[in-house]
Image (cartoon, helix red, strand yellow):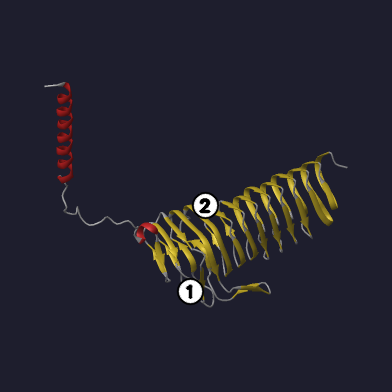
Amino acid sequence: MTTKSVVSLTAASVLLLTAALFSTRAWAQGSLTPPGAPAPTMKTLEQMEPRVPISTAPFTISQSGSYYLTTNLTVAAGNAITIAADGVTLDLNGFTISSTANPAAGYAVLINSGLRNIAIQNGVIQGAVTYSGGVFSGSGFGYGISYSGTAPQNVRVSGVSVSGCQYDAISIGTGESTLVENCVVRTAGGYGIMATTIRGCVARECGGTAINGNQVSDSRGETVGSGYGLYASRAAQNCYGYSGGSGYGLSASTAQNCYGVSSSGTGLYAYRTAIGCYGYSTSGTAGLYAQNANTCVGYRSSGTAIQATIANGCWAAAGTNSITYKYNMP
């Protein structure tokens, strides 16, 4: 057999083998039976919104979890929402909780005794209590956000507006880890805001102390009664306090960059230290009082402007000073 014949035979063999392989692959198909129903490709409502909606009141939260309002809520009497379980987040979702009870009574949000890990946020609590002639009266809630029995722990209230309450607007205790931030209060017959830490808040036209906390910053409190405008048992920073009665305008152990005004009490009272503060009193004991006053200003038209043990770089805008040791002052 010639070489040419061998090459032709080999080529023919390769073609036959390739054809056989192609034929086998072409006809060897898999099962035509479907594997089953198609798997879901869309999320369920529970997966999209893993929270519990609240659309009616009164409503009691008895299990831990996240809850949110779907509409404005109004009650004719009693409490609107009661939190009766630990580990609850309540999102007011921009809606309003109100009451038509007359006289004002009940709670907009009641936290039961001794609970912990609670968050309340983003909404409005509205009553119709007004202040006139030294009296708070009208319809609505007695309390905005408050508790019964033992004070709660690990509570945060943020972005809530409260108005027209007969007693306290936001009161969650100062002895535990509680925080109120970015909230506003207008017209409350008792405390405006009470918590361990308060920041970025405003409370005006309150019958008792407008803002009461351990550490308070960037906040404003005004009382029309005999309470304090703003009280911080530890420290106040960048705050304003006003008392229309005999209470201190602003009182803190340490006050920095603060402004206190009182009608018939001390304008700004710092038990330890006042730094860069201003105290004004119409007829009280002193415009500004501090054991240690640094770069402060006091005003008292016909009385003591600044009363201090040590004062450095301070000035009496009006009135006289009562200072034991003074430095860098005339």
Task: Tell me what residue is drawn at x 16 percent, y 52 percent.
Answer: 32
Using the image as rendered, state which of residue 220 and residue 244 is in the foreground. Answer: 220
Mark 1 residue element: strand
Circle 2 residues within 10 Å: few <14, some 14–19, many ≥20 = many
Q: Circle 1: is it few (<14), some (14-19), or many (20+) Cα within 10 Å?
A: many
- Kindly identify which residue carries mark 1: 74
Give the amino acid type for the residue marked by disc 2 in the picture. Thr
Q: In this view, does 74 lie to the left or right of 280?
A: left
Residue nearest the observer in this picture, 201 or 104: 201
Q: What element carries label 2?
A: strand
Left or right of residue 149, residue 253 in this image:
right
Q: What residue type is labelled 1?
A: Thr
Residue on which the image places disc 2: 178
Q: Position of residue 62 (x, y in %)?
A: 37, 61
Q: Is residue 228 visible?
A: no
Residue at 80%, 49% in the rendered image: 297
